[in-house]
Image (cartoon, rainbow, N blue to C red):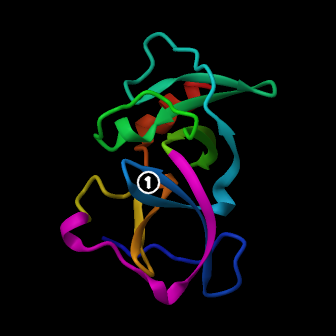
Amino acid sequence: MAEKPLSGGSGRSGELQIVVCELADEHYGLDIAKVFEIIRHQPITPVPRAPMFVKGVINLRGRIIPVVDLRGRFGMAEVEPTKETRIVVAESSSTRVGLIVDSVSEVLLVPAESVETTPEVAAGADAEYLRGIAKLQERLVLLLELDGLFGLEEHALLAGAA
């Protein structure tokens, strides 16, 4: 698997600023430069014949945003939204998309030396969405590469749902 550059976000050189989200008690990090906003869960309008991974769309201040449940995308059991559930509005390959997560806990500045590449055993052909793993005190944060979260065909379907 090719190494993905760790520069980005609003951090200084050698650091990565991430938004930490939780899914099923696991921590995932999104580059803050790709995150537009974080909103409370709201009603989602289903779209007929949309791909299975698209829960539907929301109207966010006049803009239609396709919404994806990351639990379903990662093969986890889906759960009912709670008061902690959030939709992270982010950009993936120039398409704005809403990502349903269990919660958003914090924004962190991660030193580059705390980030390791994804181990080969976890870096299968369908793991292009993993940018690396940040080792932070007592926990690990899986860093997501949003541009790798969906294939080319799926990006076209997402753009069509918007």
Q: Does dot 1 land on a helix, a strand or a loop? A: helix
Up the image or down, 161 lies above or below 5; here it is above
Image quadrant holding the N terminus, namely bottom left
Up the image or down, 76 lies above or below 140; here it is above
Q: Which residue is mark 1?
A: 148
Q: Residue 97: x, y in percent?
A: 59, 38
Regarding residue 94, the answer to whether it shows in the image is: no
Mark 1: give few (<14), some (14-19) or many (20+) Cα within 10 Å: some
Asked if residue 106 is among those painted magenta in the image, a careful observer would answer: yes
* Quarter of the image where one finds residue 51: top left
Asked if residue 108 is among those painted magenta in the image, a careful observer would answer: yes
- Residue positioned 59% across, 40% down in the render: 86
Q: Residue 104: x, y in percent?
A: 58, 52
Nearest to the observer: residue 15 or residue 154: 15
* Quarter of the image where one finds residue 41: top right
**Residue furthest to the top:** 48
Q: Is residue 131 left or right of residue 31?
A: left
Magenta part of the chain: 103-122
- Residue positioned 72% across, 72% down in the render: 10
**Residue furthest to the right:** 61
